[in-house]
Structures are given as structure tokens and as C-alpha cells.
Image (cartoon, rainbow, N blue to C red):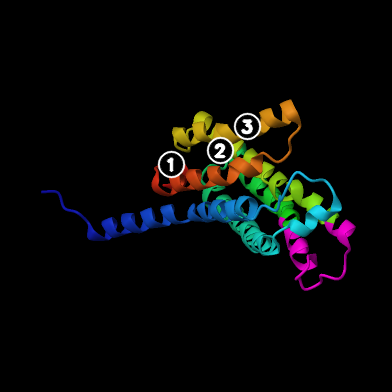
Amino acid sequence: MAHTDPHASADARSASLRRARWPLTGLAAGITGAIATLVADLHVSDSADTATVLQVNRPAAHLGVVTGYLTVALLLVLAAQWRHRVEARVPASTAARTVSAGLIAAAGALMLGYGWKGALAIYLPGGSDSTLFDQSGLYVYYVLNDFGSFIGWTGVAVSAGAITWMALRERTIQRWIGLLSLLPVLAVTMTVLLTGLPGFAGLICPAWMIITFLGLTFGNSTITR
């Protein structure tokens, strides 16, 4: 009977736990991003007059900025983890560096997008600074929120494209994740080319992050071994 080194087995289990832990940051960013962008969406009607803004749900705006800023923080932490855990493993991969760059770009843009939700939360009736702007001023913030928390997710779509390349070309990520990652890339590209719609990434990228980083957590990729 072959001798099994208990210390080697313990080390292997410990390495497996370390491998599976860091992608959970991406899962968390997808969940909080879906809440901040979709659950706390501030669209209220098809009306285009200044009175529309008074229909906005102020607690939803407050929820949006809280979960939104948490999403920004998680994206930045994930970018740092990716650079430390992944780029060090595949130093010749430009695609790996593009992933972290896309996450950082998304965080910067979303900081503004979710911040505009916070502005409505404090300036709407019932907010801490509700007397500072009239309806016309509030309407400006309402219009900014039309795509504010959606456009920033374009950076994550770029990261999805880089992960597609890593999976299908470099074979450092599971193939099914690469195929899945084509969806946000194609969807965002086609909507921009055909309609000019700038915020479709906000509809699809949070779900993509949830599925992809679950797959990285429990799957077997070169970057997580």
C-alpha cells in the first residue's frame, strides 16, 4: 500500500481552499451590482417633464448609492486580487491585464453613476438637503440617472471579452466560461452598433459576474489552481 503523507494532503486541501476563495469577491460584486443597478432602478414613467422627478422612490435611491458604492469597492478589490492571483500566474497574457483594467474602469465610472443616486436621495423631499434644488434642478439628476448606473458596466463587458480570449485562446480558464463571456460582449456590441444604446451592459454584466465567478470558485482553471 502506498504511503500517504498527511502533511501533503493537508497542504493540498489548504491550497484548494485558497484557490476557491478569491473569486467570491466577483460573485459578491455581481450581487450587489444587480441590487444597485436593477433593484434600485429609479425610472418611474415615460413622462419627460420636471414633475416626473417627484415620483422617484427616495429610499430606492438611498439603497442604490449604498449598494452601489459597495459594488465599486468590491470591483476594486477584485481587480487587485486578479492582478495578484492571476496576472502573476500568466505574466505573458495581455488579456489577463485587460481584465483588471476593465474592472478598474468600471469602478471609476460607476462611482459617478451611483453617486448621482445618492444625490437624489439627499435632494428629494424627505432628504437631508431637500431644500437646495427646485424641480428643474432635481430633474437634471433624474436624467443623469437614466443611464448613470448602467454605462459604467461597459468596463466589465471589456473584462468579459478578455476572459473569453483567456478561455478560448489561451486555455487558462474553463471553456464554458469563455463561451458564456461572449454573451455580454456580443450583446453590448450589437446594441451600440444597431441602436446607440449605451447602457445595456448594466442589464447583463451583473448576472455574468455572478455565474462566471461562481464557475471560477468551484471549477478547475489554470488561474485558480
Which segment is the magenta one? 114-138
Q: What residue is disc 3 on?
A: 187
Mark 2 packing: few (<14 Cα in 10 Å), some, or many (20+)?
many
Query: Residue 222 or 211: which is nearer the viewer?
Result: 211
* Amino acid at the residue labelled 2: Ile
| Callout in the foreground (2, 3) | 3
Q: Residue at x 56, y 32 (%)?
A: 182
Query: Residue 61 or 76: which is nearer the viewer?
Result: 61
Res 115 → quadrant: bottom right
Report if residue 84 lies within the magenta region: no
Above or below, 88 against 63 in this view is: above
Task: Say left or right for 207 vs 10.
Answer: right
**Is label 2 in a helix, a strand or a loop?**
helix
| Callout in the foreground (3, 1) | 3
* Amino acid at the residue labelled 3: Ala
Expressed as whole percent of the image width and height from the top left, the position of residue 2 reads 14, 49
The disc, 3 or 1, on the residue closer to the chain's N-terminal end is 3
Q: Whole-Å distance between the Cαs marked 2 and 1? A: 12 Å
